[in-house]
Amino acid sequence: MANQMCESCMMPFSKDPGVRESDRYCSYCYKDGKLCYLGNDLKEFQRRAYESMVSKGTNPLLARLYTFLIRFAPRWKNRKP
């Protein structure tokens, strides 16, 4: 079974508005052959993801939920918050 969501931010690929360059990551997380956020700080990545979602019109409560779920993504689940 193919990946159905981004391994970095957990966004379902069916909701990705861009053109994906990777089978593992969405168009927001992976561009020009590399991850857009190269750091290891989960909280910083979550903050940036939240701000991006809200700026694109996502309800702030839903954005908080989606941001919380990022910690379970394969890229982050073994890292400490």
Image: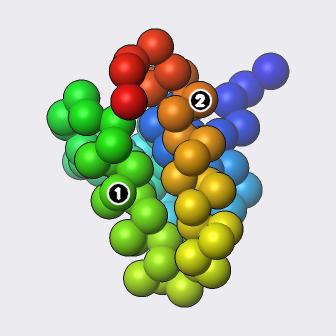
Q: Residues within 10 Å of mark 1 (few under 14, many from 20)?
A: few
Q: Which mark is residue 71?
A: none
Is 81 located above or below residue 37 in the figure? above
Residue ID at (50%, 65%): 18
Q: In which quarter of the image is residue 41?
A: top left
| Residue 13 visible in the snapshot | no
Q: Position of residue 67 (x, y in %)?
A: 53, 53
Task: Choose between 6 and 40: the one closer to the eye.
Answer: 40
The answer to whether residue 52 is left or right of residue 34 is right
Give the CA distance from mark 1 to mark 2.
Answer: 15 Å
Q: Name the residue under label 1.
A: 47
Residue ID at (39%, 18%): 79
Q: What residue type is labelled 2?
A: Phe
Q: How many labels does the image show?
A: 2
Looking at the image, the residue that sits furthest to the top is 78
Q: Which amino acid does label 1 sit on?
A: Arg
Q: What element carries label 2?
A: helix
Residue ID at (66%, 68%): 62
| Residue 57 visible in the snapshot | yes
Q: Is mark 1 on a helix, strand or loop?
A: helix
Task: Choose between 3 and 59: the one closer to the eye.
Answer: 59
Q: Which mark is residue 72?
A: 2
Is 33 located above or below residue 67 in the figure? above
In the picture, the quarter occupied by the C terminus is top left
Is 68 located above or below residue 8 in the figure? below
